[in-house]
Amino acid sequence: MSTGEFEQFAAAVSRSRPDRPLATMPHYRKIAILGGDAEARMLAAVALAAGLEVSLFSAYGSELAALRSRGAITLRGAGPIGSFHVDQSSGPSIQTSAELDTAINAAEVIILTGPVHKQRTYAMVLADHLHEGQVVVLPNARTFGCVEVAWLLRIGGCQAAVTLVDIPGLPFWVNEQNGALHLARRSAVAAACLPAQNKAVLSGLAAIFPNLTAVHSALHSGFHDGSSVVDAPALLLGGCALPSGGPEVPYGGVALAQNHNFRNLLGDGHISLITALWQERCRIAQAYGVRDLAAVETLLDQYAGTAQGEGMRAVPSVAESHAMLRSAIIGSLAPLVSAAALAGIATPLTQSMIQLGSALLDGDLQSAGRRLDNIGIQADNIDDARSAIERIVSGAAAQHGGTYG
């Protein structure tokens, strides 16, 4: 990317004036959820419980038909509990729509749910529908998610001054059982805004995302993403060489249902590999100026849940596991390897997870990944890459050119 092109891009994705940051906590009233899976429905119900006006968009008729036929979203476990109405003519109700412009037109906050490939699609489709002041939230942003969405909005023609919110995790684990969503509380996750100066937005989202911990910028929240570091070893590796964790069950015995959870998939061998993978990520993060990443035990709490109590994460199905691995490679592991290459840092363990996952899923997922050169960061060395990313996420480049709102 040439200097002029970069200036234009950075200005377009961070047009809020650097000398006039969003200084006070906003009070949002209208929110749009894009997607109809369990996580999207959970966020819609949590938002309605918080007193917001909620619209939910899905392009899939089967998702909307199922939701409308139930007439409500039922939440159990942690968080708000109860049944939250859908498409009712009176009283608080989630309003569904198969028309994107109708769903987002009046929304102050728009949440993009689903895996990485859906976030990409939403970003391109939203580009010419967003308007000034709207907030776009990526609750599973993974690594450099906001930078990629900013790039896609730019090349899709977006000229509105919007704020992107980068969150590598949801407020609850979600497990759907018999039509109800069972929630388990998640520990704190890092979050940041693009541009970074609009961090007051995070306080305005606290009713929906109570577990956010603000970090300096989307560069920092991207490196804080530990989803793939935990998920890939847990889902890909097992057997006699890497036995799972949890209480030992005597021969002929049956494990208690409460011990069948994600944290107990991880034995000592898995945790050793997770530690080594995390150390690779930490070395790369340090090269980009990010030095405050969590300890491994905190990482496990954030992304594997607890072994007991209300913070337990459910074990995913085979189909869910494959979807998780695909997003882990495309959205977390591939961008890390891309960043490492510019820093001259070897990533043998991260590369091995990519290769194992790609072989299982029968596709070249690294090529489809969120590489820096695919998201507007054309750099030949780490200094140029770091400078470009920092100027994008901070909004500093808007001081040097471009059109302002």
Image: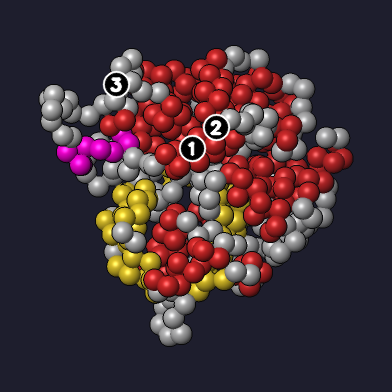
Q: Are marks 2 and 1 in contact (CB under 8 Å)?
A: yes
Q: Quick check: 349 above or below 333?
A: above
Q: Is residue 207 visible?
A: no
Task: Give the residue at the far bottom of this rendering.
Answer: 90
Task: Give the structural element (helix, strand or loop) at label 2.
Answer: helix
Residue position for label 1: 322
Tell me the CA gap for discs 2 and 1. Answer: 7 Å
Which amino acid, by three-letter code, is at mark 1?
His
Number of numbered discs overlaid on the protein picture = 3
Residue 183 image offset from top left, x and y in percent: 32, 53
Q: Quick check: 194 above or below 371?
A: below
Tell me the CA gap for discs 3 and 1. Answer: 21 Å
How packed mark 1 is, by other alpha carbons closer than 10 Å (few <14, some 14-19, many 20 or more), is: some
Residue 4 sits in quarter: top right
Report the side of 289 relative to 151 (left or right).
Answer: left
Q: Which mark is residue 337?
A: none
Residue position for label 2: 361
Q: Is residue 163 magenta?
A: no
